[in-house]
Image: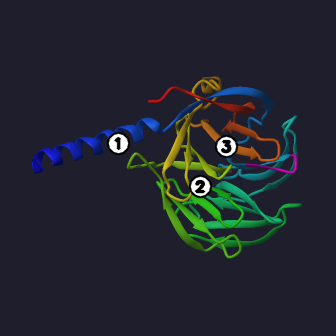
Amino acid sequence: MPLMRHLIATVALLLCATATRAAVPIYGYKVVNAYPHDTSAYTEGLFYRGGYLYESTGEIGESSVRKVQLETGKVVQRHDVPSPYFGEGIVDWKNRLIQLTWKSGTGFVYDLEGFKLRHTFSYPGEGWALTRDSRQLYMSDGSAVLRILDPDSLATTGSIMVMDDGVPVTNLNELEWVNGEIYANIWLTDRIARIDPTSGHVLGWIDLTGLFDVNRLAEPGEDVLNGIAWDAVHDRLFVTGKRWPQLFEIKLVKKPGR
């Protein structure tokens, strides 16, 4: 009987694990609007604030921070990042804009209005992306770990291991805080992970396959999906990609379970 009870318990655990995996939802999308996007913008960071998109672009010698009109795609304000820095993710905090660079271990803090450089800061490893809630910043570095930063000192105060069914999710790239979750582009894929910032568990996947045909671009291997922005006031979700000619407003549509 003890052996039978053990077998029953084991089967129950396996069934529970299977149910948990099946419960992780997958979302497709419906395109609500499409807006022009600068095809010279190698998008690394993106957020929405006060009616404008703020965008960080990469590549050495081409990196920039931009303020962009949503409806027209017109760049109304721009700061060029000097070589040898490769611009990466950005986030706003109060009246500041904070930008990472890829492999230089150096970040920049600007005035949000005017993009005047206030100071620089340092961090170990690579810098990929930033987002925030009302208390702290979250930073990706290409691994399965999100760093938690103090928004004033920019010191690391903690970390989150991102897991999907017990498996680390690597290549976490551009980030966005959406209704209490962290959305993360998965580099070189058409997927966005919806992450619980407390546990690090993936709550769902967004599959954006077919949103844009990257074969229309000059370098389809590199100019992939990257860039998420959230308009919390009007409940609008925006996505784009590197050098894509369009930025899309989408609504999520739940798919059948895995």
Q: Which residue is drawn at 82% across and 47% down?
A: 233
Distance of label 1 from label 3 (alpha carbons): 35 Å
Q: What residue type is labelled 2?
A: Trp
Above or below residue 78? Residue 154 is below
> Whole-percent x and y of residue 51?
87, 46
Query: Which mark, by number, is residue 16?
Result: 1
Q: How is the image coloured?
A: rainbow
- Pointer 1 with pointer 2, Cβ within 8 A: no
Q: Which of marks 3 and 2 is nearer the N terminus?
A: 2
Q: Which of marks 1 and 3 is nearer the N terminus?
A: 1
Above or below residue 225? Residue 132 is below
Q: Which amino acid does label 3 sit on?
A: Gly
48 inside magenta stretch: yes
Q: In front here: 38 or 90?
A: 90
- Pointer 1 with pointer 3, Cβ within 8 A: no
Report crowding for label 1: few under 14, some 14 to 19, many 20 or more residues within 10 A (C-alpha).
few
Q: What residue type is labelled 1?
A: Cys
Number of marks present in the image shown: 3
Report crowding for label 3: few under 14, some 14 to 19, many 20 or more residues within 10 A (C-alpha).
many
Of labels 1 and 2, the one closer to you: 1
Report crowding for label 2: few under 14, some 14 to 19, many 20 or more residues within 10 A (C-alpha).
many
Q: Is mark 1 on a helix, strand or loop?
A: helix
The majority secondary structure of the magenta stretch comes to strand
> Whole-percent x and y of residue 183?
61, 47
Q: Is residue 84 visible?
A: no
Q: Is residue 1 left or right of residue 147?
A: left
Look at mark 3 in the image and give the residue it sits on: 227
Q: Residue at x 51, y 53 (%)?
A: 142
224 inside magenta stretch: no
Look at mark 2 in the image and give the residue it sits on: 128
> Whole-percent x and y of residue 48?
79, 48
> Whole-percent x and y of residue 220?
58, 30
